[in-house]
Image (cartoon, grey):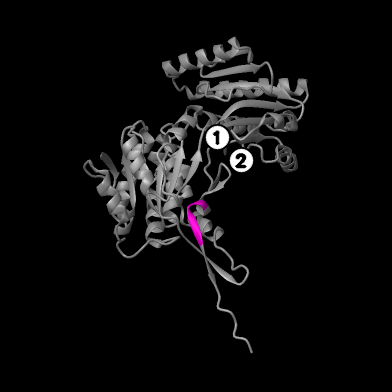
Amino acid sequence: MMIRQRCPAGPDRELDGLLDELAADVPGGPLAVGDPRIADFLVGFGRTLLEPALVRRHPELAPLGFFLRRAELDAQLARIAEPDVAGARLMRFPRGLVFHIPPANVDTIFVYAWALAALTGNRNVVRVSPRSGAAAELVLDRLGAALADAHPAVAATQKMITYDRDDRATAALSARCDLRVVWGGDHSVDAVRRAPLAPAARDLTFPDRASYAVVSAEGWLRAAPDERDRAVADLYNDSYWFDQAACASPRALYVVGTDADAAETRADLFARLEALLAARGEPLDPAMAVHKRVAAYGEAAVGRAARLDFRAGDTLAVLDLADPLDTPRGWLGAGAFPAATLASLADLAPMLGRRDQTLTHFGFAADELAAFATAVAGRGIDRIVPFGSALSFAPVWDGYDLPREFTRLTTVGRPAQARR
């Protein structure tokens, strides 16, 4: 089976040969958790992503560059250090070979998970989709350039490859890995799971999820105009980056408060968002416009949307929900916002389940958010973050503590004290 080798860049090659190379002795000795050879490489690579010209073209790369700073990597390693327990020493080691299958619709997500798996000393092979966009290509270019100054152990243990949908290739990689990390829709996850793992290996899956935005009407009306403008800019970043297709991007917006306050809040929020879209002047892809229209009218046809409002040259679509707790979970297109009013934040809790991931918020007090999390009781919602933070990757994602998932523990008992 032939694969395209993306990083380290090279000619197409046999997959078996690449897997044998990953299983060979590592130059300079085996990798360890926090291995300085890998950490130095990640820091140098991250620095290249913060070049001003690059950030202007691809602003989503700036958070990735900050994520790879030395201080942040050291903080993650310190966080997973294990204290001694019950008279035994706990030692943390890499899990082994990690096979990553990231989504094509979010160009940079694979870098975060791969970086944490590499930092914790794993050998990694990442299948980069042939449908990945410009940001992914830039990342691969910068990774390749950073390898020039890296220890040979990096190129020997970290592989980025591309192949078309090929069950044989996926099966071969699955059979040899110790952990398989799968991002994508439910159907994609199910398809990958048909390839068996070794008995001691396991899956870490990130299937279809839905996310929401909530606004306190009282908090919004109390906020100064410049605070509202910043909130709308943050909502724009949460929603329009990656065409609102990221699982963490809000798929519906709820205003919490009295009917009168909620109506005023909603009118002001969407008017400010419409003005921001007009000022940015970004053209709407015709295919996206058609998709959004078809999806919105489809929701109206089944009675889920009671009213449709297309604004700002169709870059914004607001769908009034007939039932606030019956919202579309699927993707309607970039800039589509099913919207409703709730009397209290707790009213949202009955709707939520395991498919629901992120709740972005504005105007709520910390104790209100904690009470809401208690009401949901773990049935759904893994992240409750402010506007503007939906797409900020964190090492704890979808309820998984990734640095811990990428490692395993060995218990070393101390010798018993000699009896007197």
Q: Outermost residue toward the bottom?
A: 420
Q: Is residue 16 magenta?
A: no
Q: Is residue 170 above or below residue 262?
A: below
Q: Is residue 1 left or right of residue 417?
A: left
Residue 227, horizontal then vertical, whole percent: 65, 34
Which stretch did the figure color magenta? 405-409
* Residue under label 2: 383
Q: Residues within 10 Å of mark 1 (few under 14, many from 20)?
A: many
Q: Is residue 147 above or below residue 1?
A: below
Q: Quadrant of residue 283?
A: top left
Nearer to me, 257 or 111: 111
Q: Is residue 420 above or below residue 139?
A: below
Residue 324, horizontal then vertical, whole percent: 69, 22
Looking at the figure, which quarter contains the N terminus?
Answer: top left
Residue 420 visible in rendering: yes
Amino acid type, callout 1? Ala
Q: What's the mark number on residue 248?
A: 1
